[in-house]
Amino acid sequence: MVKEQIGQLEQADTAAQRYLAQAPNDIAAYDITARILFDKHGPDLVIKTLKPFTETGKADKGTYELLGEAYTATGQPQSALEAYQNAQILAPNDVAVQTSLASLRVDIGEPRIAMTDPERTLAMAPKAPQVGGRCS
């Protein structure tokens, strides 16, 4: 959302709430609204809002990623790990999820497990195009 990106959280919040009222089944709208809540009110409100939503079975990868970020910010690494693992289940080839999961595992003292994640992440990352020829 452009308004959120330029720091107009009040307007972004109003726009997101209005859209969510018109499209209550749009999971992306929940994710955007939760991101605004995070930026505006902090991670505790995001956890309070998203945790029950995850129990509806409608949560997507973005929902779990934001929940993982909120748990990390509030010092709840085990809950963050569970959230990121749920995101990984929904998007097993998502590089951002793999990176967040590996970083968290290092932070919580699981370096051996975390070391396999970067290898997997690098294998999934898009490859840079090969440049042929020689420079003179």
Image (cartoon, helix red, strand yellow):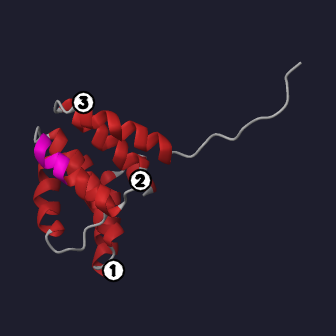
Q: Main secondary structure of the magenta part?
A: helix
Residue at which label 3 appears: 111
Regarding mark 1 in the picture, which secondary structure is present there? loop
Is 42 displayed left or right of 128 in the figure? left
Name the spot of residue 43 as percent of width and height, x first. Answer: 17, 47
Measured Cα–Cα span from mark 2 to mark 1: 26 Å
Instruction: Answer whether residue 46 is magenta in the image.
Output: no
**Do the numbered discs 3 and 2 sit on residues whose CB atoms are within 8 Å?**
no
Image height of 88 relative to 24, above or below: above
Residue at which label 1 appears: 23
In the picture, the quarter occupied by the C terminus is top right
Q: Nearer the viewer, mark 2 or mark 1?
A: 2
Q: Nearer the viewer, mark 3 or mark 2?
A: 3
Residue 115 can be seen in this image? yes
Mark before the other along the chain sequence, 3 or 1: 1
**Do the numbered discs 2 and 1 sit on residues whose CB atoms are within 8 Å?**
no
Amino acid type, residue under disc 2 in the picture: Asp
Give the residues drawn in magenta, as a range. 77-82
Measured Cα–Cα span from mark 3 to mark 1: 42 Å
Amino acid type, residue under disc 3 in the picture: Pro
Q: Quadrant of residue 93?
A: bottom left
Residue at which label 2 appears: 94
Q: Residue at x 24, y 73 (%)?
A: 58
Q: Residue at x 24, y 45 (%)?
A: 69
Mark before the other along the chain sequence, 2 or 1: 1
Residue 13 can be seen in this image? no
Instruction: Give the crowd class for mark 3: few <14, some 14-19, many >=20 residues within 10 Å.
Output: some
